[in-house]
Amino acid sequence: MALGALKIGAKSRDEFLERLREINQTLAATRPTARNLFRAIDRMQQVAEAGKNIEQIKKTLVDEAVKIHSEEAEATRKLSQLGAELIQDSFTIVTHCNTGALATGGYGTALGVIKQAKEQGKDIKVLATETRPLLQGARLTTWELKKANIPFTLITDSMAGYFMSLGKVDCVIVGADRIAANGDTANKIGTYSLAVLAMENGIPFYVAAPTTTIDLSLASGNEIPIEQRSQEEVTHIQGVSIAPEGTKAANPAFDVTPHHYITAIITENGIIKEPYIERLKKIG
Amino acid sequence: MALGALKIGAKSRDEFLERLREINQTLAATRPTARNLFRAIDRMQQVAEAGKNIEQIKKTLVDEAVKIHSEEAEATRKLSQLGAELIQDSFTIVTHCNTGALATGGYGTALGVIKQAKEQGKDIKVLATETRPLLQGARLTTWELKKANIPFTLITDSMAGYFMSLGKVDCVIVGADRIAANGDTANKIGTYSLAVLAMENGIPFYVAAPTTTIDLSLASGNEIPIEQRSQEEVTHIQGVSIAPEGTKAANPAFDVTPHHYITAIITENGIIKEPYIERLKKIG
């Protein structure tokens, strides 16, 4: 929004704000599920509406953007430090999708916790799910784990449950795109399955997310809008077709994990457990 | 084995049988998990050992091979008919991997049941999992479903649980590579996860397999050998790399679903439920 605002050549404050609202709407329409996006652009809009003149608003928007970014970075670093206390020496950790510096506004959420545990000198291993359809685990998480010198093994999404059943997993930790008031959490498709499998095998299941992910306006996860993406992301992998021509595919990008599967939610303001509905209100 | 036997140019019956044993061992070493393979080659070996002279043995082996094939075809057709009774009109069915005519010795197992339900005029829909790493669902099951005019949607393996949680799945049906005496079932990696997710969501989970899949010599699924395949099947999809160079991957080709997750096992000799340990002995 700041970059867009700098390019607006409006003649009046009203025209400027109107054009800024269009930029806001364009950004808001990119993705419906993640909460942080809406928090950030709403905050930018509010800052702009409170400004006196165009030049001052432009400067304020740039300052606010930098501030949001550094707050997010600070929040992820802090939640990673808090969360790392849950990771014990010799743990094997399952994580899903990418939640490191590549995906978040800072240090990382689930992957931040893992990196912090490593920085504390803990001897850990990661089972990274490839995360179909877009393979963020295979492409990005592996790259970040390698950079951080954390031993890892890439697995298909379908293997995580099997390794849990063999007793080879000590905890599961994932990020979140939106957390409803009752603790229900929307995250990358496949997260719900990992949570059910973790509970079935008596393995802790942690969600790591900054408080900007919390949406107290939604009573439960049923109200979280789930982005439906194109069929081609399923029928093709990196441009190569994997199914017969004309095959129809579903592609919900996220799913919702009901709160009772979540052992704890790790935020920069503390690690909380059930009843989430009271505790999220205090920190969200 | 029959084709191999026809090419043996041995001078004596003993030499011929020795060469046949080598062929047997070569075939046995191809894959460790599926039971049917060992049943078939053991049966061929026994028939050969009982033969009088080389020419007679060669003829007997060809006859026996044709017989095994037609028995397998008949068994899958019969179990498909029996199993189709479990499929109700308007069902949406999750299936995993390929279990149709392309993968079995005949009509199909899980996919046979689905095809039979369609032939009975039932209005059914299938959610076919792509089945990473080798994508048998995306490549083969979709093709067979299309041929059979059964409406289907391709999903990633990670989506099945989510659709179950939305109440959009009426049953899960899969094949089996080996069934231990207590009903524990080895099948394509990801099957265990589907079974846990089905139980969690109160959805019936069926295993469809001919009795040749049953291995009464193994007390439980813990004893079933699981084939570990190459890392490249995970780090590459159809020859295209999906992970950074040097990424290590796990690739167990199968997993084991404990019997208590299985609502029923569908065989050509009947549909059985717990206690499997008694009922499998009667039909296996």
Image: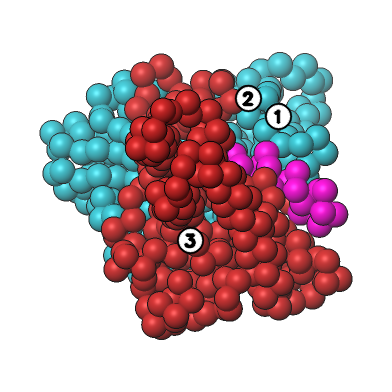
Chain colours: A red, B cyan
Q: What chain letter is assigned to the residue under label 3?
A: A
Front-lying residue, B162 or B5: B162
Label 3, on which residue? A213
Of badges 3 and 2, nearer the viewer stands 3
Label 3, secondary structure: give it: helix
Do discs 1 and 3 share a chain? no
Q: Residue at x 82, y 39 (%)?
A: B246
Of badges 2 and 1, nearer the viewer stands 1
Q: What chain letter is assigned to the residue under label 1?
A: B
Q: Using a 10 Å C-alpha cutoff, classify the residue at mark 3 as few (fewer than 14 neighbours), some (14 to 19) or many (20 or more).
A: many
Q: Marks 3/2: CA distance? A: 37 Å
Proximity of marks 1 and 3: CB atoms separated by less than 8 Å? no
Q: Position of residue B168 (x, y in %)?
A: 26, 50
Q: Position of residue B159 (x, y in %)?
A: 42, 47
Residue B49 lies left or right of residue A227; in this view the side is: right
Label 1, on which residue? B241
Residue A270 versus residue B18 in the image, above or below: below
Q: Residue at x 50, y 35 (%)?
A: A5
Front-lying residue, A14 or A216: A14
- Is residue A38 among what the camera can see? no
Please, what is the three-letter code of the amino acid marked with disc 1? Ser
Q: Marks 2/1: CA distance? A: 8 Å
Label 2, on which residue? B238
